[in-house]
Image (spheres, helix red, strand yellow):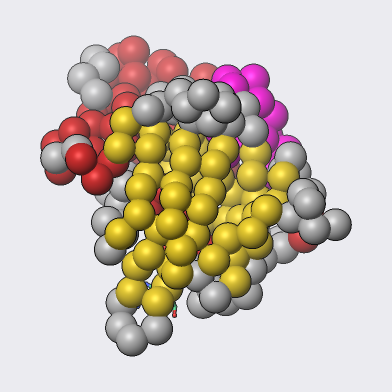
Amino acid sequence: MTPDGALLTAQDLRKAYGPTPALDGADFSIHPGEVVAVMGPSGSGKSTLLHCLAGIVRPDSGSVRFDGRELSQMGDAERSALRRGEFGFVFQFGQLVPELTCVENVALPLRLTGVKRKDAEGRALEWLERLEVAEVGGKRPGQVSGGQGQRVAVARSLVTSPRVLFADEPTGALDSLNGERVMELFTQAARETRAAVVLVTHEARVAAYSDREVVVRDGKARDMAGAV
Ligand SMILES: Nc1ncnc2c1ncn2[C@@H]1O[C@H](COP(=O)(O)OP(=O)(O)OP(=O)(O)O)[C@@H](O)[C@H]1O
Ligand SMILES: [Mg+2]
């Protein structure tokens, strides 16, 4: 960790896909156990920031440090080991593997780190129970509702007890009642495991689950703490 205790930090991130930059000198930091909402208009660079922080996209310049390690200095194998072992992900449309059952989907991140099937599926089932969807464990994603599928996706993001959870519009496809319950269960689990949560959202009611808000505008990120 850095001297101020931050777990994940970014400095002066720049990333351009064309003539206009998606990120134009963005800074960010998050502490263990902290839930930070990343807000801002469509196209402002929120997802690009999340992808750079998670080591999915390489920024053109700038630094991302996780637990004192600079991501740009890691090789591809080391970065994907970091993503598998230390990070968890939830996206807007769950992105479950359609051929696998829900239990198998949740167990997958554990299987990828070498956990035996029986143990992995046992832990997966515990997380499905926590997310109140144990009854869909044996079904495939195509056979469950949107809200159930998203709970399965949340369970999958938590099953490895990641140190950072990246969530990009995790409830964007849900109605408000389902969205609220998923956010409650998600942030509660994250707080218990002391995971840091980078939560990208358009919605104020989702951001209300965070400890702090960061607004991305024109590729720059601004902490709202001093601005309100
Ligand atoms: N893979 C890509 N190829 C080309 N341009 C991209 C790519 N990803 C993002 N962009 C562009 O970069 C800018 C920032 O996009 P980004 O997806 O980060 O925005 P966002 O804030 O997440 O928007 P939204 O709220 O709509 O999801 C946009 O102008 C977008 O068109
Ligand atoms: Mg986005």
Question: Height in image: 37 above or below 215?
Answer: above
Q: Which residues are magenta?
A: 181-197
Question: Height in image: 116 above or below 171?
Answer: above
| Image x and y of residue 167, in percent | 52, 48
Residue at point 34% right, 13% down?
119
Give the tally of numbered discs.
Answer: 0
Residue at point 46% right, 24% down?
1
Query: With 85 as the anchor, is 175 left or right in this view?
Result: right
| Image x and y of residue 203, in percent | 72, 63
| Image x and y of residue 75, in percent | 14, 40
Q: Quadrant of residue 100?
A: top left
Task: State the residue in front, 191 or 27.
Answer: 27
Task: State the residue in front, 22 or 85.
Answer: 22
Query: With 79 as the anchor, is 63 left or right in this view?
Result: right
Residue at point 35% right, 48% down?
63
| Image x and y of residue 10, in percent | 45, 47
Task: State the residue in front, 150 or 226.
Answer: 226
Query: With 40 as the anchor, is 71 left or right in this view?
Result: left
Q: Can residue 53 be seen?
A: yes
Magenta stretch encompasses residue 162: no
Question: Height in image: 113 above or below 43?
Answer: above
Q: Can residue 96 be seen?
A: no
Query: Quarter containing ligand 1?
Result: bottom left
- Which residue is outermost to the right? 228
